[in-house]
Amino acid sequence: EAGVAQSPRYKIIEKRQSVAFWCNPISGHATLYWYQQILGQGPKLLIQFQNNGVVDDSQLPKDRFSAERLKGVDSTLKIQPAKLEDSAVYLCASTQRGGLPYNEQFFGPGTRLTVL
Amino acid sequence: AQSVAQPEDQVNVAEGNPLTVKCTYSVSGNPYLFWYVQYPNRGLQFLLKYITGDNLVKGSYGFEAEFNKSQTSFHLKKPSALVSDSALYFCAVRDLVNSGNTPLVFGKGTRLSVIA
């Protein structure tokens, strides 16, 4: 079974530029999550999708961050404009159909973003 | 709101010795508890979880964890450490208050170093 795919793996941009990250979850996984992991901290949920609908985006900085999952499969997370404090690893995860709270999440390798 | 504390940034143990990585949590309702491991340049991998029932949970790679409700703890243990266990370990909790869709909240992580 193929795992969660993310691209790019690394990205370096200057502040005020825009950037986009892509995620393809495990086949058949209806629930998709985006996390932000700042160095020295645990992952923090940014947004959760169930199919193509948003379940929780309460911690997404909506003035600069946006995410979509138009066809209920792959997803894109965008930052525009980027700030220095956005430097982090962005992790995508998915869970099995239903996204029940006790299901373990499967994580991709992440995208390491550096904002200069 | 739920929270997780991992009081140790770093744990060092000799190969073959038992290891313990500590985790305490705070929730309003009942918890779902998880342990994940992160190897360099890789995403998080699920180790084990507590949902209900037996307080001693066994997981991947010989790891186990004990749920202690009175002490609100969920420490990760292994009887005999291997050098290959060296990695970053995250404890995470989901609060089942009101059966709502609360996010998975991670601790800041504990770096385990197993010395040969």
Image: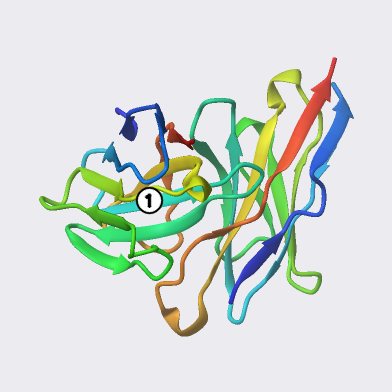
- Mark 1: secondary structure: strand
Q: Quadrant of residue B14?
A: top right
- Which amino acid, mark 1? Trp
Chain assignment, label 1: A
- Tell me: residue A78, above or below residue B67: above
Q: Quadrant of residue B6?
A: bottom right
A84 and B9: which is toward the camera: A84
How many numbered callouts?
Answer: 1
Is any atom of residue A43 visible in this view? yes
- Tell me: residue A106, above or below residue B13: below
What residue is rendered at 60% in x and 37% in y?
B37
- Tell me: residue A80, above or below residue B16: below
Q: Does A94 sit left or right of B48 as displayed?
A: left
Q: Quadrant of residue B81?
A: top right
Badge 1 local density, few (<14 within 10 Å), some, or many (20+)? many
What residue is rendered at 63% in x and 30% in y?
B61
Which residue is label 1 attached to?
A34
Is any atom of residue A98 visible in this view? no
User: Residue A59: x percent and y percent?
Assistant: 43, 66
User: Residue B36: x percent and y percent?
Assistant: 58, 43
Most extreme residue toward the bottom, as rendered?
B98
Q: Does A74 sit left or right of A34 as displayed?
A: left
Most extreme residue toward the top, as rendered?
B116
**Which colour scheme appears in the figure?**
rainbow
Where does the N terminus of chain A fall, quadrant-wise?
Answer: top left
A69 and B50: which is toward the camera: A69
User: Residue A5: x percent and y percent?
Assistant: 31, 31
What residue is rendered at 43% in x and 42% in y?
A90
